[in-house]
Image (spheres, grey):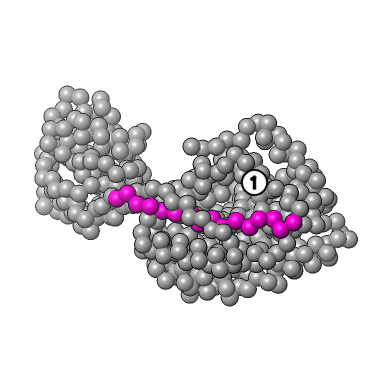
Amino acid sequence: MIRKRSLSILLAASLSLGAITASAAPVAPAGNQESEQAFDNKIVKRIKVENIYNHIAELAKNPRVAGTQGEKDAVDYIKSQFESYGYETELQPFNIYSYTAPSLIELSIDGNELATNSFTYGVNGEVTSEFVDAGLGAPSDFEGKDVSGKIALIQRGSFTFAEKIMNAQNAGASAVIIYNNGVGVINGTLGEPNDYVPAVAITQEQGSALKARLDDGETVTATLKIEGAKSEEATSHNVVATKKATQKSTNQLILVGAHHDSVDGAPGANDDASGTATVLELARVFANSPTDTDIRFVTFGAEENGLLGSYEYVSKMTDEDYERTVGMFQMDMVGSQDAGELIMYTNDGEKNIVTDLGAAAGARLANTGEAIPYGEGGRSDHVPFEEAGIPAALFIHAPVEPWYHTPEDNLDKISLDKLEEVSNIVGSAVYQVARPDTPALEKAKVAPKEVDYVFEDRELE
Ligand code: BES
Ligand code: ZN
């Protein structure tokens, strides 16, 4: 279930932000800048970047694919770290489907081997038969054709891969080959485990050449063999540690998050052991800091499977927590020496209280006084929060490094400077709201002066 904030809540939220609006970022007036920085320093001086590095070293020893033992080991590590700082820590389990790609895929046409790609959640099988051209794979594309037992050749477009395969199967086809309608290879998914007929993808050139032969009335025979594919139900977890306000609570709640899972075949040192490790270190520092605001540190599972952990978290939020959450800070890929500069992305490309706080903290901490820019981007766990109406932003370095989602995303590429910058900025931004001497956001005396920060249309890759 996806939450939507009602209009009245949205209205109340925008009113309650007072002077902190999307255009007025919270930075203290000139005279107070020094004391503001003294507050930053209370957090900054206690952040130990070596701790962050050591967490990354531990987490990136193995891949942490959602639903595998590798993820569970990471989850146990994160939980025990939170607990060692004194946090009450909760695991939030949820079901996902895991998929193991085939160990063997062979397609030979008239005895010639052709390169192919499998679909995520595709099945195993072995079929030898002749081709039938089935257009885009709509039900009408099969009418009046003898499809029974044959391999349907279908072009990409208009329907999902799963729909095309189902239509072919209903018409009696024994297998499906889908060819691209643009350049490159298809890296597709069938969405969930299924018992469709076997299917693979080929390129546009390969498909067009085949179709031309079929159009000429040729009979073309192929053998397709897929082995070792496996779809399974598995359990992923979010890890949640809550810090309660230590004094005169405003009852407001701030979320600080990252995803702890990684893709198959990559140690995920930067994506996103870096963010997870930074969440841990900020949790350690805040454990002993006075705050009048609750802070919840969350590491999400199954981000790489489609932001499943953060969608799960949002769908399970209590109404009370939902309404008192003032912002969500997501850190994903925050420590690569080979990535670009820091930027804050929101899914809708608009400023919000989180980007305001981040920009202001960045300006206070940078020698140059320059604020961090913001941009438009999804692709991480800030998205479900934003969709639900909670101000959220992704802190990331862009463009991302060339090692993204490769075996080279390892500890050697981690930059202590980058980790220091992000942990200091996010820590200071959170503390500006959470510390007891600043009023709750509705009173907004934290924000008498704007900091200028600009929209940047920066490429991520
Ligand atoms: N850390 C990445 C997000 C990312 C990558 C943002 C490159 C910007 C540039 C994240 O873990 C990821 O890979 N996300 C998926 C999307 C998700 C919905 C499965 C992606 O971007 O493909
Ligand atoms: Zn990531």
Task: Say which quarter of the image contains residue 369.
Answer: bottom right
- Read off the residue under disc 1: 325
Q: Is 448 situated above or below 286?
A: above
Residue at 63% x, 57% y: name it.
Answer: 243
Residue 84 appears left or right of 250: left
- Say whether residue 284 is visible: yes
In the figure, is residue 64 to the left or right of 109?
Answer: right
Residue 144: quarter of image: top left
Dominant secondary-structure state across the stretch colored magenta: strand
Residue at 51% over, 41% down: 315
- In depth, the one of 199 and 152 nearer the eye is 199
Label 1 residue SS: strand
Q: Is residue 417 above or below residue 308?
A: below
Q: Amino acid at mark 1?
A: Thr
Nearest the eye: 432 or 155:
432
Residue 374 in the image, given as x and y percentages of width and height: 65, 52
Give the crowd class for mark 1: few <14, some 14-19, many >=20 residues within 10 Å: some
Q: From the top left corner, tell me how far across and down residue 334 is, in percent.
A: 56, 63
Please say whether residue 367 is one of the residues in the magenta stretch. no
The percent position of residue 452, horizontal first and vertical second, equals: 76, 53
Does 239 appear in magenta? yes
The x and y percentages for residue 171 are 19, 30
Q: Which residues are magenta?
A: 232-247
In the displayed structure image, the side of residue 349 where residue 155 appears, left or right: left
- Residue furthest out toward the right: 31
Q: Residue at x 16, y 51 (%)?
A: 225
Residue at the image point whose x is 48% and y is 45% from the top:
312
Q: Is residue 434 visible?
A: no
Query: In the rendered picture of this protein, how many numbered marks are placed on residues?
Result: 1
Q: As displayed, is residue 63 above or below residue 195? A: below
